[in-house]
Amino acid sequence: MTKVILNMKILIVSATENEIQLLKKDINKKDSALCVRKYTVIKNFIVDFLITGVGGVLTTYNLLKALSVKKYDVVINVGIAGSFNSELKIGDTVFVQTDQFADLGIEDKDELFTVFEKDFIPKNQFPFKNSLLENSYEFDFGLKKVSAITVNTTHGSRKNIELFKNKFNADIETMEGAAFFYVCLNEGVNFFQIRTISNYVEERNEANWNIPLAIKNLTQQLLDIINVIVDTN
């Protein structure tokens, strides 16, 4: 028999308003305070939304600020992503198992070294495990598990795409994921990240992107996940 915990507090974190605007239309507005917009969803579960802004610095600051104000049972990072993996289709939603700061490093001629490879940070210094940030959340919701890299500048040139693809062998690329992982691991909160593929990481050609489909699928998957969280608590 499942136990339903009323007023379970969930924080949904997104870089932009656009990525979660459809979700907001499916739930009833309750009130708002500071930078966190609050809503109530089914079965009296409380969902707060945090729009951090794009990039790791803004994500780190605004997420830490939100977590210092209120405690959450689970924090969820959502958004769209570019894929290095041709087996992932545009519109697919994935569960990010590992993430890393890919462009936090040192260039030496034509080579790129991470801060871990140059021993600026020990590879297993908490919260890192062999240079990676890992999510050990109990449920993956039946989504494909992927590895991700986080960058300050998304890739659109063939040379850099090949460099980062070959070096990190990641499935997807975002601009916030590793910062989100880093904060949540250090703060000791339950968390996970889901992303929906909007494009492939290739020479920039927005005609090949499908952001509306990605946001639509992300919204539906997130509504399903909230139901799963409800049913398993």
Image (spheres, rainbow, N blue to C red):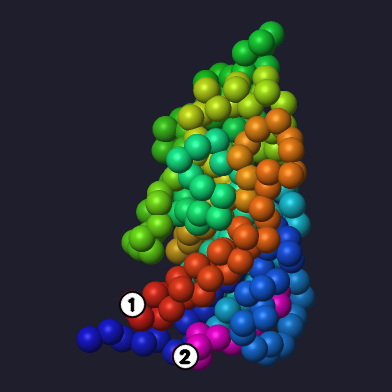
Asked whether, in this view, residue 1 is left or right of residue 114, the answer is left
Q: Identify the residue at horizontal 40%, vertical 51% (top origin).
A: 144
The answer to which of marks 2 and 1 sits earlier in the sequence is 2
The one of 162 and 126 positioned closer to us in this rendering:
162
Residue 43 is marked as 2
Q: Which secondary structure lies at badge 1? A: loop
Q: Are marks 2 and 1 in contact (CB under 8 Å)?
A: no
Task: Kindly indicate the quadrant of the structure image that contains residue 15.
Answer: bottom right
Q: Magenta residues? A: 36-45
Tag 1: amino acid: Thr
Residue at mark 2 to residue at mark 1: CA–CA distance? 13 Å
Q: Percent x, y for residue 75?
A: 53, 66
The extreme left residue here reads: 1
Tag 2: amino acid: Lys
Q: Percent x, y for residue 217?
A: 56, 64
The extreme top residue here reads: 109
Q: Count neighbours of disc 2 (C-alpha within 10 A) and say few if under 14, some if 14 to 19, many if 20 or more.
A: some
Residue linked to disc 1: 232
Q: Percent x, y for residue 100?
A: 54, 39
Residue 208 is marked as none
